[in-house]
Amino acid sequence: MSNYNLISCDDHLDLGQLPADLWTARLPASQQDRAPHIEERGGQALWISDGKVWGRWQGRIRPEGAAIAPSPVISALERAGVDNEGQRRPGVARLRLEDMDRDGVYAHVMFGPVTSINVEEPQFRDELHRVYNDWLKDFCAPAPDRLLGVPMLPEDPEAATKAFIAQFLDPFVDLFAWGILERHPKIRIVMAEAGLGWLPWVVQELDYRHWRLWETKAFWADKGGIALKEKPSDLFKRQVYVTFQEDHVAMQLLDFYGAGNVLWASDYPHPDSVWPNSHAAIERQMGHLTPEVRKRLTHDNAAALYGLKT
């Protein structure tokens, strides 16, 4: 066990684990007829809004002795022997904190169900995000230094957001190719759930293309010059952070990233999560690292990035 607090930088509050009255209790009367709510359909409890099915709600307590239907995906909770999802443990602060204590993790950075809120109208979607954010503040209040909720922001501009959601590599490259990071050096980007073993080639290729671009500076001299001054790898090390759960390849490539850009995560409660065995996962992939580097990956980097005093 470490002698410092572990901070997990990619954890979740999924739609199925939210309170059934999250929106019905908080939306104004004029929007109650559209409020996301729970309906029973085909023997399942489902989130419904404007007649659309958003997904399953997991808050029904399974009757004692009831059979558990086989599933193609095993959640972290099931894997750890928590066989009644109706408790909504990730969505109840007291129970979530119990699970964090069981795992020996001090803090969770929690992402909400952004893609599950299936609403096309921007104004109504923004209102649903606002209500979720209000609830999230209350959810985190019992332990604000441990429950670190990430708010859902308005999706603007819409076209750029849709492209970012639909794709990944192109927008990542665009941050460098269009000079976004260079023009805004205080921006910090966190690539959650991306892993990082694949990134060296991409950033190396960006550096190579940057070099080739500057090779032709004479051509661009009378066309406004070349706006991209800094090497992409330097921008990456200054402004981009990446989370991982278990990435043995990445642990061999820390010289490339610089240990200050890497954030460990447990991914609770998703199927890929290492909960409740986070310490074992850290040991088996970081055992060869110095104690100082391990501390940076599992605590110091997150504390510095998010301004945590823990």
Image (cartoon, rainbow, N blue to C red):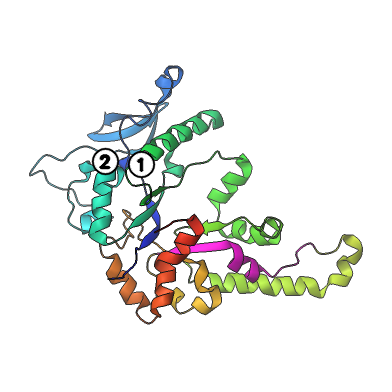
**What's the amino acid at mark 1?**
Ala
Quadrant assignment, res 1:
bottom left
Q: Which residues are magenta?
A: 227-244
Q: Residue at x 31, y 75 (%)?
A: 283
Q: Which residue is mark 2?
A: 58
* Distance of label 2 from label 1 (alpha carbons): 23 Å
Q: Is residue 186 left or right of residue 270?
A: right
Q: Position of residue 301 (x, y in %)?
A: 47, 65
- Of residues 4 and 21, which is closer to you in this image? 4
Q: Residue at x 44, y 66 (%)?
A: 300
Direction bottom: furthest residue = 288
- Dot 1: what SS? loop
- Above or below: residue 101 compared with residue 236: above
Q: Position of residue 72 (x, y in %)?
A: 27, 55
Q: Is residue 84 left or right of residue 263?
A: left
**What's the amino acid at mark 2?**
Gln
> Which quadrant does the C terminus fall into?
bottom left
Residue 230 among magenta residues: yes
Q: Which mark is residue 141?
A: 1
Q: Position of residue 59 (x, y in %)?
A: 24, 38
- Of residues 108 and 143, which is closer to you in this image? 143
Q: Earlier in the sequence, mark 2 or mark 1?
A: 2
